[in-house]
Amino acid sequence: MSEDKTNIDEKLIAGHEYDGIKELDNPLPDWWLFIFYATIIFSAIYFFYYEMDGGGKSSDAILAEDMAVVQQQQAEAQSEVAAARAALPQKTDADLANLGLDTELMAKAGDSYDKNCKSCHGEQLQGGIGPNLTDKYWIHTGGTVTGIVNVIHKGVLEKGMPPWENIIPDAEIEGLAAYIYKMKGTNPPNAKKDEGTLFDNY
């Protein structure tokens, strides 16, 4: 540090001396003032550019652009999944119904039902918020296992059932549909009354 103090103004601020320590009224260094004024100028330019329609994008506009990109990517991904799903060999009602013969698969499907379906359709598929799944009446499936698969995939939004196609894997949905179909006619206690159209085809 320089020992040259000849330029220091020894003018004391009145009442600001304690134990021999003085507070002086010296000017701020030029470099400090330069930075201070530069920040004022920068903030004025920044405010005009971003807040006063000076051509800069607002945070809302940037967010909207980013969200549009994300939504486009999601749409493309969903299209790819749909195309891949459509390219898979389509299982028939008989193929899906035969899944009910696989004991291990049905145990896993039962766990999937408990996790995802029980809260609306009841522990024994007897119905609750959702319809009874053990009687011979169907509301949306057309009385087929493939119909059950489609309903699980797409949901029934007007009834409050969400689509599960992007949540549950296809193979698990097929097993779940076979499990529901297998449970038809089990007549659990306190079953909800019949809803929909009678399909006596099982």
Image (cartoon, rainbow, N blue to C red):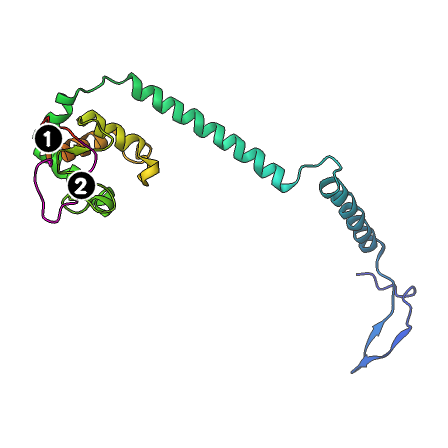
Q: In the rendered view of the protein, which quadrant contains the N terminus?
A: bottom right
Residue 81 lies, in percent from the top left, at 35, 24
Which image quarter: residue 115?
Answer: top left
Magenta span main SS: loop
Q: Measuring 17% from the left and 37% from the top, which residue is drawn there?
A: 109
Q: Check disc 1 and give the amino acid type.
A: Gly
Closest to the observer: 87 or 130? Answer: 130
Closest to the observer: 191 or 121? Answer: 191
Q: Is residue 129 above or below residue 200?
A: below
The residue at which mark 1 appears reads as: 100
Q: Which residues are magenta?
A: 183-197
Q: In the rendered view of the protein, which quadrant contains the C terminus?
A: top left
Q: Secondary structure at mark 1?
A: helix
Residue 200 lies, in percent from the top left, at 10, 28
Q: Measuring 58% from the left and 33% from the top, which residue is drawn there?
A: 65
Which image quarter: residue 149?
Answer: top left
Q: Measuring 85% from the left and 54% from the top, which residue is drawn there?
A: 30
The residue at which mark 2 appears reads as: 132
Q: Is residue 115 above or below residue 24?
A: above
Residue 189 as seen in the image, left or right of residue 36: left
Number of the front mark, 1 or 2: 2
Is residue 100 visible in the rendered structure shown here?
A: yes
Q: Check disc 2 and give the amino acid type.
A: Asn
Residue 29 as seen in the image, left or right of residue 46: right
Closest to the observer: 140 or 150? Answer: 140
Name which of mark 1 and mark 2 comes first in the sequence: 1
